[in-house]
């Protein structure tokens, strides 16, 4: 039954909240990946560092930057401050803010102020400036800024329809990003040695976990014995880690259920069904089976399902046709 | 008896750079004595160091920036957001001064609404030749589409922001009626919020009337327009979008009222009914507080190239299925040439003299008046009749020969489009500028909410705009003006 006391939400507002959340999640993910990349390569020579940067760049969809001359300072400058680069942190935060700005009366003032502060801080910094100081500290502060925004969101905004659109946006983005990150690492893991790609070391798996802020949580479950199958199991199938794909799928499904309860939408079934199927496949997944089959195809399928859920949400709530809405 | 008078307060070192001239000074009398309502502020200023004041100013600026209380400057490629410069020192209006302003504005708004109803129906005032028919029909903002359209409650203007200036005599006069989509009320409200944090104790000592209920009164005003058969009307604020200079204000008002902020693309018209697109399907809209000009509101009825409006909205409006506030076509009554006739409009409909005077105005359309204007371009202010926001004007005494020549040609080419007024000595109020207290020219824009049937509410306050550049007479935010909090006292 639709909740008749709830005020309906403009489709555009839902769209803005969803993308605000996705863009901020993307910016945070990039900040995290850059910070651990810096940490890992800071004491390596360019020959060692290069394949690692190539992998990280591929994981955040910015392979085009991975040319021969790419070094840490150029990569971080471009992915952090280059407003022309759509993958850069500054672009993502500006997009998150532009979306938030269009729904200022929907989100709490505290949320807007926090997002605006993060934006003004990134705008006021420059690559030269952070390399003068401590670059890793800069990314740390950025992550904290994004976490604070999430905390403020949970503490100050009603947990109604809009909040669930924020949740769905965040976890769809996270599920896709984590799947991609796993994919880039396991493609190397499974590649035949003959291709000459440096084999992954212990250190690389730790980096992967840290890129998902999951190293400590991993150690609590598996101890510091870092093995690729355990890493895959943890980041894909763990039911409690907020960074695992399964956890994200669960939140997406719950969010969509809550949204369809509050809107009573007649077209919501498809998005919920797709999200439920993704969640269930992860609930009952076995890491040994996944790794025995084509893991790349498996991870790719997860990302495709995320895309299908996104499309179904749009069809149900945002870009539905006027004819279908008027004809009762 | 102590008859010996102490030195004038203005002699204090804090006021070293504070000079009095022929303009009315809000804080000091001509003898340099503090006017009584300003005494608590004066005493507080003497207690504070320049460093204290700087600290408070920085704090206020940061608050505005972090809250994103900004406006967009047009003609700048990036659509730069700037904070509206804010001056720390409040402008004070006594309760007896306010009583005159309030009565004068109510009278004026009632008369202008009767005028609008008349010219879009019978046109008695035109038949009686009180106002030349051509003057009304040639007005750029006259909308012939509105002829014969009955507006609910005969309320054409629900929200008005009238610009007042204080003349050297101390008397308030009306400079402009803004009857279309007046902006700035969010600054009135946020200025007060910042001021309460910067000078908490001063409020208690001065006795300032609250203004926080503006949002609620606005909502009541808009509700009163809804059709009676829609007991729980859906009210929305319609904004041109995030690139509009007043976008912050649109979000602010929607939030204050707890209603939806919509853009044209969120609305659609089907069978002359307006709907908004929500996640739960389409929902009918009853009252639209629109912050989009007439020209852009419906590409089918007005400018076809508008992408901000809603196709079919005007038909839904004519059919009575939706109410627009303000009504379409109100701009004819704030045309600067019609302005010159407002005292006659008040006399004609209300049979009384205007309480608030007009500023002397020369109509360039009139041959004799035009000749006078062209002879005195260096002394007068020339304004384009349909513009607002300080665009399209010439300030004679501050102009170059080249600018005057340009306006001379403009006036001769299209005399109906221009009026001229004497260069007014706007009153001056103390401002905190570069570490010192100095006088700057100010005006005052109170906000009037009209529900019809003599139900007119004016929240006691307004936006005091300041020409922050020394000597400047232009207070518009788009032209480097700032603002300050406005205090109307209980007594």
Image: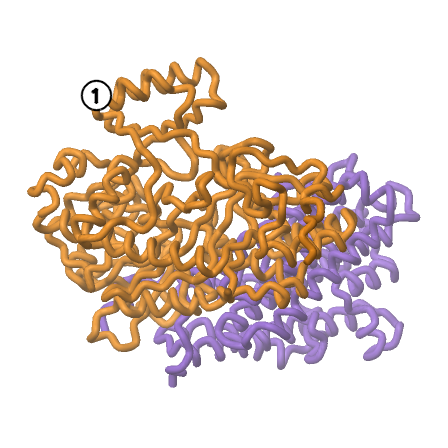
Q: Which residue is mark 1?
A: B367
Considering every residue shown, the one lying at the far right of the view is A43
Q: Image height check: is B399 above or below B51?
A: above
Residues packed near mark 1 inside 10 Å, few (<14), some (14 to 19) or many (20 plus): few
Q: Nearer the viewer, residue B5 or A59?
A: B5
Query: Picture coordinates of residue B164 (x, y %)?
Result: 41, 46
Query: Picture coordinates of residue B179 (x, y %)?
Result: 31, 49
Subunit bearing disc 1:
B
Q: Is residue B22 left or right of residue B292?
A: right
The secondary element bearing badge 1 is classed as helix
Please tell me which residue is depicted at 43% across the width and 30% down the height of the picture: B423
Q: Nearer the viewer, residue B72 or B117?
A: B117
| Res. B462 visible in picture | yes
Please tell me which residue is depicted at 69% across the width and 61% down the height of the picture: A146
Q: Image height check: is A69 above or below A123?
A: above
Q: Image height check: is B392 above or below B296?
A: above
Q: Which chain is orange?
A: B
Q: Is residue B491 left or right of residue B193?
A: left
Query: Picture coordinates of residue A244 (x, y %)?
Result: 69, 71
């Amino acid at each position: 039954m639709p909740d008749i006391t709830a005020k309906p939400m403009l489709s555009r507002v839902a769209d803005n909240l969803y993308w605000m959340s996705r863009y901020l999640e993307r910016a945070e993910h990039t900040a995290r990946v850059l910070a651990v990349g810096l940490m890992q390569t800071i004491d390596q020579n360019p020959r060692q560092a290069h394949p690692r940067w190539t992998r990280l760049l591929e994981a955040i969809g910015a392979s085009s930057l991975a040319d021969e001359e790419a070094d840490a300072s150029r990569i971080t400058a471009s992915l952090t401050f280059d407003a022309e680069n759509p993958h850069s942190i500054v672009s993502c935060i500006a997009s998150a803010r532009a979306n938030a700005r269009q729904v200022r009366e929907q989100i709490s003032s505290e949320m807007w102020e926090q997002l605006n502060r993060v934006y003004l801080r990134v705008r006021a910094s420059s690559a030269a400036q952070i390399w003068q100081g401590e670059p890793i500290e800069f990314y740390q502060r950025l992550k904290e800024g994004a976490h604070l925004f999430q905390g403020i969101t949970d503490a100050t905004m009603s947990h109604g329809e809009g909040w669930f659109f924020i949740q769905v946006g965040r976890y769809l983005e996270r599920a896709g990003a984590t799947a991609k990150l796993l994919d880039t690492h396991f493609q190397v893991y499974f590649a035949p040695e003959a291709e000459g790609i440096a084999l992954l070391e212990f250190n690389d798996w730790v980096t992967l976990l840290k890129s998902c802020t999951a190293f400590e949580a991993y150690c609590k479950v598996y101890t510091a014995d870092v093995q690729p199958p355990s890493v895959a199991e943890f980041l894909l199938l763990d039911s409690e880690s907020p960074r695992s794909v399964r956890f994200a799928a669960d939140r997406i499904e719950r969010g969509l259920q809550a949204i369809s309860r509050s809107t009573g939408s007649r077209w919501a079934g498809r998005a919920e069904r797709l999200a439920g199927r993704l969640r269930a496949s992860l609930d009952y997944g076995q890491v040994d089976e996944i790794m025995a089959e084509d893991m790349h195809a498996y991870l790719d399928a997860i990302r495709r399902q995320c895309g299908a859920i996104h499309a179904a949400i749009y069809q149900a709530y945002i870009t539905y046709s006027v004819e279908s809405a008027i004809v009762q | 008896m102590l008859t010996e008078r102490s030195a004038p307060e203005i002699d204090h070192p804090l006021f070293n750079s504070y000079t009095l001239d022929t303009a009315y000074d809000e804080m000091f009398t001509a003898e340099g004595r503090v006017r009584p309502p300003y005494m608590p502020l004066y005493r507080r200023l003497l207690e504070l160091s320049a460093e204290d004041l700087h600290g408070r100013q920085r704090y206020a600026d940061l608050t505005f920036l972090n809250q994103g209380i900004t406006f967009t400057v047009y003609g700048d490629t990036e659509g730069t957001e700037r904070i509206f410069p804010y001056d720390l020192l409040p402008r004070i209006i006594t309760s007896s001064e306010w009583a005159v302003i309030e009565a004068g504005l109510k009278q004026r708004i009632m008369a202008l609404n009767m005028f609008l109803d008349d010219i879009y129906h019978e046109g008695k005032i035109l038949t009686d030749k009180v106002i030349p028919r051509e003057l009304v029909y040639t007005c750029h903002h006259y909308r012939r589409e509105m002829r014969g359209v009955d507006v609910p409650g005969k309320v054409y203007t629900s929200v008005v922001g009238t610009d007042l200036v204080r003349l050297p005599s101390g008397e308030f006069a009306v400079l402009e009626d803004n009857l279309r989509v007046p902006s700035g009320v969010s600054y009135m409200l946020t200025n007060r919020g910042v001021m309460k944090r910067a000078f908490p104790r001063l409020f208690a000592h001065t006795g300032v009337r609250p203004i926080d209920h503006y949002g609620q009164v606005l909502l009541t005003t808009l509700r009163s327009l809804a059709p009676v058969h829609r007991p729980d009307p859906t009210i929305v604020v319609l904004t041109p979008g995030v690139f509009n200079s007043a976008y912050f204000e649109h979000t602010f008002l929607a939030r204050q009222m707890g209603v939806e902020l919509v853009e044209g693309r969120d609305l659609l018209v089907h069978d002359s009914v307006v709907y908004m697109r929500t996640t739960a399907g389409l929902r009918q809209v009853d009252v639209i507080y629109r912050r989009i000009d007439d020209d852009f509101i419906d590409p089918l009825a007005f400018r076809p190239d508008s992408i901000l409006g809603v196709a079919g909205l005007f038909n839904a409006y004519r059919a009575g299925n939706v109410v627009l506030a303000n009504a379409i076509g109100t701009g004819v009554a704030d045309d600067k040439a019609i302005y010159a006739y407002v005292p006659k409009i008040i006399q004609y409909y209300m049979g009384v003299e205007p309480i608030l005077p007009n500023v002397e105005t020369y109509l360039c359309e009139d041959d004799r008046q035009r000749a006078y204007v062209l002879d005195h371009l260096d002394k007068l202010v020339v304004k384009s009749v349909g513009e607002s926001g300080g665009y399209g004007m010439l300030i004679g005494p501050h102009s170059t020969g080249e600018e005057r020549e340009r306006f001379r040609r403009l006036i001769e080419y299209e005399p109906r489009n221009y009026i001229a007024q004497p260069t007014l000595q706007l009153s001056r109020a103390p401002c905190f500028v570069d570490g010192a207290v100095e006088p700057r020219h100010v005006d005052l824009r109170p906000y009037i909410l009209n529900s019809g049937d003599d139900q007119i509410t004016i929240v006691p306050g307004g936006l005091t705009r300041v020409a922050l550049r020394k000597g400047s007479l232009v207070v518009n935010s788009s032209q480097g003006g700032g603002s300050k909090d406005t205090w109307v006292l209980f007594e």
